Image (cartoon, helix red, strand yellow):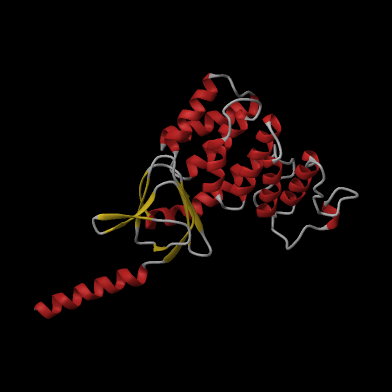
Amino acid sequence: MKKLILAALASMVLCATLSAVPLRVSWADGKVERQKGSAWIAVGIGDQIDSADTVRLAAGSSVEITDGKRKVAMTAPGIYKLDDILKRGAEMARKKIGALDKLGKLVDPKASASTTAVAAVRGSAMEPGQDGVTWMEDELDFDAVMGEGRALVRLGEFAAAAAKFDEAVLASEGEKKAEATYAEAWALAADDRTGQAVKLLRGMASSGAWEGPRVLLLSQLGLETGASAEAESLLSSAINAKLFKGEDLELAKSMLADAKAK
């Protein structure tokens, strides 16, 4: 009888081991930990974990985890069972594309998060006279660099677009810096680097012409990554301050209802 019990336990352990999916931490910011027994161990970029693990995030932290094909992000403080997060990943990805398409129109009218990526920027996508290279002279040409970033967005080259927008962020101030930061955050989100996008948006100044777009994009990403309380607070404050009107107001109210329902 004892042998049968031991065999059954061994079988259960083997099944649990076989069902666990190996994962890698592709992004981590702030205090992110993995549970091991009764202890919590710090997790960093490049660490190997698996789908049976439980992770814990402190306030202001974020993490992205991938199995090489899929990626999930968490940006709210709390304890997460990765199996549960991975199961919801496909549904979250579908919702994310539709929302990003709406919020990407300020980056470029033709922006789409579902655009098929290509190997390189085609000459036809660049403005006449551009060769795809940003020539660094006395100072960066903000409009030219932003134009190159938008051309990359239209081609679905979101990683390259984010890098281009980052050039504009580093070389600008005020409203131009806010515009470039929003564009970079959107491109990062479209490139499935949600944690990095959230960090950028949280760091933006909460004022000026880009505050409304910042609140909408940050709230949408928060709804997808467990930060519904942050989204509710941001949206409520912005709506009460009459920051939105027209379609943006309707979108904000819809997102606020979603945040309250979670």
Between residues 235 and 133, which one lies in front from this camera angle?
133
The N terminus lies in quadrant: bottom left
x, y percentage for residue 162?
66, 49
Q: Does residue 182 appear to the left or right of 222 in the view shown?
A: right
Q: Residue at x 78, y 42 (%)?
A: 140
Between residues 152 and 216, which one lies in front from this camera angle?
152
Residue 117 lies in quadrant: bottom right
The C terminus lies in quadrant: top left
The outermost residue toward the right is 129
Q: Residue at x 26, y 71 (%)?
A: 13
Q: Is residue 201 above or below residue 160?
A: above
How many numbered marks does the figure carry?
0
Q: Residue at x 74, y 54 (%)?
A: 155
Q: Is residue 17 above or below residue 136?
A: below
Between residues 201 and 101, which one lies in front from this camera angle?
201
The outermost residue toward the top is 241
Q: Does residue 158 appear to the left or right of 224 in the view shown?
A: right
x, y percentage for residue 43?
40, 56
The outermost residue toward the front is 138
Q: Residue at x 55, y 36 (%)?
A: 203
The outermost residue toward the bottom is 3
Residue 109 lies in quadrant: top right
x, y percentage for residue 256?
49, 31
Residue 4 lies in quadrant: bottom left
